[in-house]
Image: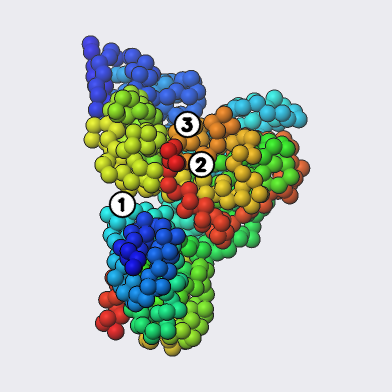
Amino acid sequence: MPELRELYDAILNGDHKTSAAVTREAIDAGIEPMELVSGYMVPAMDEVGKRFECEDYFIPELLLSARAMKAALELLRPLLAASGAKSAGRVVIGTVKGDLHDIGKNIVGAMLEGGGFEVIDLGADVAPQKFIAAIKERNPQLICLSALLTVTMPSMKTTIEAFKEAGVRDGVKVIVGGAPVTAEFAREIGADGFGENATAAVALARQLLQAA
Amino acid sequence: MSIAIRLEPLGTQVKTEPGAPLRDLLLPFGVEFPCGGKGRCRRCRVRVLEGDVDPGAGGDAADLEPGCMLACRARAAANATLEIGQFEAPILADDRPFSFEPRPGRAIAIDLGTTTVVAQLVDLATGAVLGVRTALNPQAAWGADVMTRIEHALHPEGRARLRDAIHAALDEMIASLCGNRQPDAVAICGNTAMLHLFDGLDPTPLSHAPFEPVHLESPNGFLPCIGGFVGSDILAGIVATGMHESGDLSVLIDLGTNGEVVVGNRERLLCASTAAGPAFEGGRISRGMRASTGAISEAAVEGDGIRCTVIGGGPARGICGSGLVDAVAAGLDLGRITPRGRTPQPLELADGLALTQADVRELQLAKAAIAGGVRALLHQLGAAPADVRRVWLAGAFGNYVNRASARRIGLLEFPEETVEPAGNTALLGAKIALFAPDPTFRGVRVIARHVPLGADPAFQDAYVDAMPFPDPKA
């Protein structure tokens, strides 16, 4: 019987080799994938988020923990799909057109994944059409838009307007984030919410999808 | 009769006699007299907050800000209060020798920085610098950083305002250097955004990915730029350091808000701009300030604590970039900051002045942008840090930063003996351009290539990898 607490520790310490090894052992021992996700992985990423909030963890630790979490998730994904386990929700995330900044968006994506969401990452410099195509094909409940420059923030507005024109805006919730973005700006451009940081984004995503 | 001169922001008072030169009074408090008290460089100006001071001959030149006078000329007259904090970053001029082809005439070399502008009048027959003027870039009124200014210039009226402001400032500097006689030539260097704002060009291409400007050249004396945010100031820096002529692999780092990095040799030069942010200039640091009176400029471990050096010797008011790098290096050596950057307790430096966890994080982001940029460019050349023979540090911060501390925090990952401060390479390069502009600069542009780091996944990895501090035990 594998020591499952090691999975929690491995994610918290950013050790992707151990997290994968423990997950493999657990699968072999016939442990339910959902038990690993909700019992160890989600709590570990919650703790990572808390440590980031209280400034114990910084960007490198966050990314290392995300990698360790993903290593475990990769192994579990086929099993989760086969068992028909329901995710907390399906999310499409991307940095808006004109902006190449990736790291903040990657962190939010990883925290959402760690929070039990299914995350489809479209990358950086994503045109509105690409978001719209993903909405039509993948049927997500939530869209996350990221921008790191004041000069690319208007691109968030353009993207949401394009959603309206394409008739897909009402079927999804849209949240925005990134260093220069404010709650006021989010309201102005007609977003459903604003995530001050990665942990706030996860909480907001849970709240919006519950209300929906 | 004895009178009292109160000095702000030091809060100290000195007793003296009417008629005593301010220079003698202020020198012990760190006010510098770079031109030797000739009333020329204006760097020693002080503001009279209260009372009367005799400006002396030429100490109240018309182009000084209201209430200001030159301390090198002025004399005490009655009880007074002076503000002696210098109002701007130390602006590096350059008077290093260079080889040139003499010809008759006088010309102007200008370093048009985002924050400061330096203009030199050069005698083309001797290469001698006949005069220097420094000023703050008046465009700063529309944003201290380049992006805010670009945003303002997206509209034609904003563009015109920014162009007119910098033209007026340069006209004034040139007129004050040359009088009625027009200069025979002008060479200006600055980053690509400055070129756009100087010529009133639409900066839209600089405001979004892929950040590829249409205009890299100007018909108005602005030297050609290399690409994206790598401008003619960097081209000038390459020419000034001679890295384009050397067979050895060398690195040029300009440590400003946009930390520009060049890596290569006479065959190939890769140039990139990294978003280092203003931490090295004291920006976004809780007690950060520019390198002026009252700033902690140096720090070192002493026993279990940290001993700080304050510019002017008075009480510490804040900390500047070089002090920040020193203090964090000392904090690491004392184990008060972990290699991951965790700072459980504020790092006490002086009475009521400490570095916080957030300050250390700011520095981590800034130094990772530079170190990650250098790593990514070396990687593209298939080279390792050990292959680098010479590292040039351009700009004021590069001049003052302690090389051992810079290595300790992982800002510079090279042995100290390979690192050399290069002064204001942009200004020296502009001066060289006055003599042999076209062939040299065009030749460098042929071998120099702009690398957009934002689009390079290897940079993102290198950036994150460079965020922790080096662990001597690892």
Chain ID, mark 2: B
Q: Is B163 left or right of A49, judged from the image as shown?
A: right
Quadrant hosting residue A144: bottom left
Chain ID, mark 3: B
Q: Which mark is residue B255?
A: 2
Pointer 3 with pointer 2, Cβ within 8 A = no
Callout 1 amino acid: Asp
What is the distance, in whole Å, between disc 3 and disc 1 at their CAs?
Answer: 27 Å
Q: Residues within 10 Å of mark 3 (few under 14, many from 20)?
A: some
Callout 3 amino acid: Ala
Residue farthest to the bottom, as pictured: A167
Q: For the residues tagged 3 and 1, is the chain the same?
A: no
* Residue A49 pos. (x, y %): 31, 61
Pointer 3 with pointer 1, Cβ within 8 A = no
The residue drawn where x is 35% and y is 75% is: A31
**Circle 3 is placed at which residue position?**
B404
Q: Nearer the viewer, mark 3 or mark 2?
A: 3
Q: For the residues tagged 3 and 2, is the chain the same?
A: yes
Q: Is residue B184 above or below residue B313?
A: below
* Residue B168 pos. (x, y %): 52, 45
Quadrant hosting residue B420: top right
- Sequence-first disc among 3 and 2: 2
Callout 2 amino acid: Leu
Question: Which quadrant does the N terminus of chain B fall into?
Answer: top left
Q: Secondary structure at mark 3?
A: helix
**Circle 1 is placed at which residue position?**
A56
Report whether residue B159 is seen. no
* Residue A209 pos. (x, y %): 30, 80
The residue drawn where x is 69% and y is 37% is: B248
